[in-house]
Amino acid sequence: MSAATDMTPAIAIIPTQKPARDESARLGFRLTLPAQILVLFIAVFPILMQLYISLTDWSPLSGTDWWNAWELWNSFANYTDLVADNRFWSAMWRTAVVMLVCVPAEFLLGLALATLFADEFPGKRLLYSILLMPMMVVPAVAGYMFFMLFQSGGPVNDILSSLTGTRVAIAWLSDPTLALVAVMIADIWQWTPLMFLILLAGLVGVPEDQIKAATLLGANPWQRFTTIVLPKMKTIIIIALAIRVIENFKIFDTLYIMTGGGPGVATETISVYIYKVTTQDLIWGYVAAIALAILIVLSIVAVWAMKRMAAARVAA
Amino acid sequence: MKRSIPFEFFRYAAILAATAITLIPILWMASMAFKPIGEWSATGAELTWWPKEPTLANFRFIFGESDSSLIVALDRTATKPILSSLLSAVFGTAIAMGAGTAAAYGLSRFGSGQNLPLALIQLRLFPPMAVMIPVMIMWAFLNLTDTWWGLALVYGIVTLPFAFWLMKTFFDDMPREIEEAALVEGCSRLRVFTRITLPMMRAPLASAALFVFILNWSDYLIALLLTTREWVTVPVYMASLSSSMTGQLYGAKAALGLIAAIPPVIMGIAIQKHLVRGLTFGALKQ
């Protein structure tokens, strides 16, 4: 008893670091807890569940609850089916084509616009705001805008008619090739502003004295651009491209509203393909296998992208 | 730097061309929203960029007034889908911002939750389509399918990475002297967070919340999979405004599209200076 009363003042007078650190650690833990629970709830648990279902023939129509899916165990049949699924691979290929056209186009257009906006000029603020608008339009609504524009009696053909002087009535969305072109135009329209925004932020961050020095040394604008501006913007360019590659891979809303993946499967990208298999064919065990295969590939990309971003933050 | 006159001319020509291309789709839809049914699918010489007889009939139609020129009456109006979109986006934003802000502060100040940055980047990376099977099963089990609160929960989780990363970079940038002074004064760490840090961060919090709201409001795919009838959101409802019997209800859809498009555009312009930070997960600041 007496020992305890002796101890108490000593602690009060000479506080050690430990209680404060404990308090911080406890509060830090409590503050991060809700986010951790949400991640477990939507990421960790669902992915384990998906792994389990992907090894079975389970579907919502099979009449058993999902946890009894082992009754329909099929080992790795879904995965071997996937390797031989032509519709899956052609959807993958189509997604890659859309990406290989859209992302470079968005990048080059965005970079060109950013270069034009690099210094001050009258009307800059207003024009800047207008040029950013497409990326804020709800993608489904943007899809509907382009659905209207590309009707065979619609405004796009009307503009083409007045440019060529002949009556143009192309049925954009019912031609397999042109439908894909139309879908890509819509994506480029909506997401060039994002490239423009990010690249402009990078461009104004390039130190002006270096550019001036290069000018004094006799470098022409093109040399200044390739030897100073581009190297300085390397990380930013990688981030901008990574963001668009990731988002473009998911392409669904605009495309699905415009064509529904059609005509036939002409514009069926990977998200549209999974959506159709999910809602029409209802073979969820198989869908789980597709989804999981994609998630594994993307996780590897995520780790890589994360390292790039960490590097960028250190550099900034 | 002085620029030559030909350069200035070229610059304005290029920028104005880009502006025109940017505006054409938006203006076409805006114009369609005010066109009477007779002008909806006019082609050739009949096609006009401005409504010849502007009317509010399309707006009245989607809010329930029957239109004598249309055979169909809507079996439901746009009111409830708008409510559904609003409720799910607002509460989804609240969930993302609540959990995201707390976690960002915990990581930024106390180093807790080191796994979150990578976990949340991965969460963002996944196509929603690739994790929806388990979510659909769970939501059906929990009776959350076709409710705005079930949708809000998914939105809260899907946009959590943005809320977390945005707030983390804001907290990292904030000078700590005031917090440290309050600690010396004897405030508890929780009190410092709720009474000093959060009020100081009002403006960044508002920008982050608007950013997250735009993302939630813009969703189509998740609502398409998780709502069927009662609580469909605006984009899902909009896609249903056409059938084999009626054809495309162009004007009605355009009116609804205009209503859906206006709030995020205004909000986006309001938070322009934080857009870069938000879109690059804080890797870049403007």
Image (cartoon, rainbow, N blue to C red):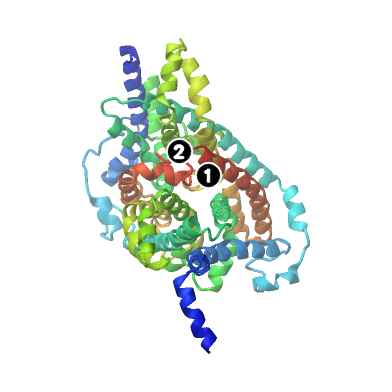
Q: Which residue is mark 2?
A: A191
Q: Nearer the viewer, residue A108 or B253?
A: A108
Q: Residue furthest top?
A: A218
Badge number at residue A300: none
Q: Chain of mark 2?
A: A
User: Badge 2: how crowded within 10 Å, few (<14), some, or many (20+)?
Assistant: many
Q: Residue at x 53, y 26 (%)?
A: A231
The reply to whether residue B87 is visible in this rendering is no
Left or right of B252: which side holds A195? right
SS at circle 2:
helix
Q: CA distance from mark 2 to mark 1?
A: 10 Å
Q: Quadrant of residue A161?
A: top left
In the displayed structure, A7 sits above or below A251; it is below
Left or right of A315: which side holds B233? left
Amino acid at pointer 1: Glu
Q: Nearer the viewer, residue B225 or A112?
A: A112
Q: Which residue is mark 1?
A: A247
Question: Residue A11 placed where, x, y %?
Answer: 49, 74
Residues behind callouts 2 and 1 on a single chain: yes
Q: Chain of mark 1?
A: A
User: Badge 1: how crowded within 10 Å, few (<14), some, or many (20+)?
Assistant: some
Q: Nearer the viewer, residue A299 or B58?
A: A299
Q: Residue at x 66, y 64 (%)?
A: A48
User: Is there CB contact under 8 Å for labels 2 and 1?
Assistant: yes
Q: Nearer the viewer, residue A301 or A79?
A: A301
Total tally of numbered discs in the picture? 2
Amino acid at pointer 2: Trp
Q: Residue at x 57, y 37 (%)?
A: A99
Question: Residue A2 placed where, x, y %?
Answer: 52, 88
